[in-house]
Amino acid sequence: MRVVQGTVVIRRRPEVCANYVTTPATWPEWYPLTRSVEGPVNSTPAVGATWVEKVRIVGLPFTFTWKTIEDSRPHRYVYQGSSNFGGHATITYVWKAEGDGTRWDRTLVYEQDRWYTRLGDWLFLAAVIRSASARAVQLARERLEALPGK
């Protein structure tokens, strides 16, 4: 099992941050691997709702089916899912007011279920996912801080 964490402080209120990053339609704007999303994606999916994310990692197409399991915005949001290659993951977002902004902690916990995806994870996937996750929180911060207003 791998754990990938990212933290950033964003000069916006927790509610604004939470609503933006939990709206799957925004993911292609700030998550480098996301190519598209389908389903209830134009706002935060409610607990129990499912949606599909299509990503490309080193040229390989992956499809993830996600499900919201907790929505305590603007404090916490958790979703989990599985990929077409057999991996499964849980992503937890936590927001805390910090100074005139918000501290956002993003934690991805994932595991590969098949021998070939475990090998791929060991060889290159883990590094790509860590890099994309680190870039994602920075891009989300940039996008949020570029929005008009506070």
Image: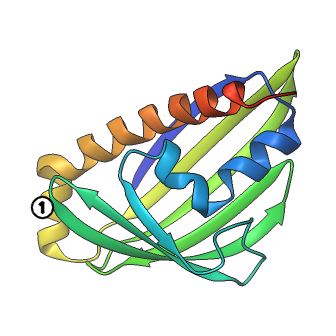
x, y percent for residue 70: 77, 68
Can I make out residue 141 in this image?
yes
Give whichever of 123, 85 is nearer the camera. Answer: 85
In this figure, what is the number of numbered marks?
1
Give whichever of 97, 35 is nearer the camera. Answer: 35
x, y percent for residue 39: 58, 81
The quadrant of the image that shows the C terminus is top right
Residue in view at x 70 percent, y 35 percent = 104
Give whichever of 32, 29 is nearer the camera. Answer: 29
Residue in view at x 63 percent, y 70 percent = 41
Disc 1 packing (10 Å; few <14; some 14–19; many ≥20): few
Render colour scheme: rainbow
Horizontally, residue 29 falls left or right of residue 140, namely left
Q: Which residue is mark 1?
A: 119
Q: Tell me which corner region of the image, top left, top right, bottom left or bottom right, holds residue 54.
A: bottom left
Q: Amino acid at mark 1?
A: Leu
Q: Tell me which corner region of the image, top left, top right, bottom left or bottom right, holds residue 34.
A: bottom left
User: Which secondary structure, mark 1?
Assistant: helix
Horizontally, residue 105 falls left or right of residue 11, namely left
Above or below, 27 against 97 in this view is: below
Give whichever of 138, 145 is nearer the camera. Answer: 145
Can I make out residue 1 in this image?
no
x, y percent for residue 42: 68, 67
